[in-house]
């Protein structure tokens, strides 16, 4: 199914930018992730026409609902190879295996990485997908963290790049991950580090190969309430005894009143572990009413990414037009 984020105008000389989104998120986040990228690309499109098509890969565990949803709204990954898209976004997912190469979807994911290298103007790889890309392309292994890196962290620009044009020198970015890619290994392999945080490490990094590879360890696409919903989900897993450890509260994200209320839930859960304690959670609208500190950064960065793709499309179209004109003149 094709989703449109169309903004008629003079952008890209009326040439649509075709973007494929390979959504690997688990069922609980499948619709939310699709909405996040759709809304973000709609805002970033400005006066361009962006056409977004969703794809899924085999190997990601799915419920019956998830399989039906993918069958109705998503294209099979085999349709990607001849889709003619200009840009690609690949999401991460929750890790299952200790090693990425042991994930059930690893082979399919590496096929996408190789295909993007040869056929894309630019691609974006998010979180676990970024870890997979650098492992497959450059042999860079992720490092496990002692605890989940979870919350809102301030990052500074590490180097100038066209993707950061118009971005402030310091930006807040949501993170939610169990592993990280070490900066020294990235630098040694020729990646440009664009943003980093003293606490969260590298977030955005790029490498110009045959196409432009753009990686995020964080999640600029997140909505205001996403971290809160993830925290509530993880607390629910603890209360249902699906996890042995009570999750860490997201850092730098909630106001003190909300943190105090959530600390009461935690204290109660540690002595009386039952699922109905989730009813004590504050309403998510309390988080939703707070300011989204990363939204402008996310829109600007994705707008710059779309502009990079558009410039390459114009250049290719101009080259083809010049070649046709030359052949016509020569034959005359």
Image (cartoon, rainbow, N blue to C red):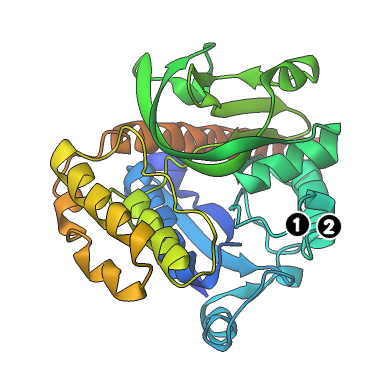
Depth check, front residue: 59 or 324: 59
Determine whether, in the image, residue 188 is placed left or right of residue 22: right
Q: Residue at x 54, y 62 (%)?
A: 243
Q: Residue at x 75, y 64 (%)?
A: 82
Q: Secondary structure at mark 1?
A: loop
**Residue under circle 2?**
102
* Residue 167 shows up from this direction: no
Q: Secondary structure at mark 2?
A: helix
Q: Residue at x 26, y 48 (%)?
A: 263
Depth check, front residue: 36 or 256: 256
Quadrant of the image occupied by residue 95? bottom right
**Residue under circle 1?**
97
Q: Is residue 208 above or below residue 79?
A: above
Depth check, front residue: 6 or 242: 242
As drawn, the label of residue 46 is: none
Depth check, front residue: 15 or 55: 55
Q: Residue at x 50, y 60 (%)?
A: 52
Q: Residue 61 appears at what percent x and percent y?
A: 66, 73
Q: Are marks 1 and 2 in contact (CB under 8 Å)?
A: yes
């Amino acid at each position: 199914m094709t989703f449109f984020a169309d903004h008629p105008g003079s952008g890209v000389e009326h040439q649509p930018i075709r973007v494929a989104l390979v959504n690997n998120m688990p069922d609980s986040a499948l619709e939310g992730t699709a909405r996040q990228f759709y809304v973000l690309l709609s805002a970033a499109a400005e006066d361009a026409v962006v056409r977004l098509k969703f794809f899924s890969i085999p190997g990601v565990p799915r419920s019956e609902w998830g399989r039906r949803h993918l069958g109705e709204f998503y294209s099979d990954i085999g349709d990607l190879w001849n889709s003619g898209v200009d840009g690609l976004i690949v999401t991460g997912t929750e890790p299952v295996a200790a090693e990425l190469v042991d994930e059930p979807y690893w082979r399919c994911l590496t096929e996408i990485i190789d295909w993007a290298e040869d056929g894309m103007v630019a691609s974006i790889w998010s979180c676990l997908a970024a870890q997979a890309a650098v492992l497959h392309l450059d042999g860079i292994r992720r490092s496990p963290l002692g605890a989940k890196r979870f919350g809102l962290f301030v990052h500074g620009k590490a180097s100038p790049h066209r993707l950061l044009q118009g971005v402030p020198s310091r930006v807040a970015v949501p993170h939610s991950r169990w592993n990280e890619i070490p900066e020294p290994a990235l630098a040694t392999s020729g990646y440009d580090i664009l943003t980093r945080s003293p606490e969260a490490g590298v977030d955005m990094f790029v490498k110009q190969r045959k196409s432009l590879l753009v990686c995020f360890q964080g999640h600029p696409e997140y909505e205001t309430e996403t971290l809160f919903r993830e925290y509530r989900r993880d607390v629910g897993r603890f209360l249902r005894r699906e996890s042995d450890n009570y999750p860490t509260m997201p850092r730098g994200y909630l106001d003190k009143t909300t943190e105090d209320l959530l600390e009461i839930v935690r204290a109660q859960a540690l002595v009386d572990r039952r699922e109905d304690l989730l009813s004590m959670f504050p309403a998510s609208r309390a988080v939703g009413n707070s300011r989204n500190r990363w939204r402008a950064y996310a829109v600007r960065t994705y707008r710059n990414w779309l502009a990079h793709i558009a410039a390459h499309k114009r250049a290719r179209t101009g080259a083809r037009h010049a070649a046709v004109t030359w052949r016509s003149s020569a034959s005359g």
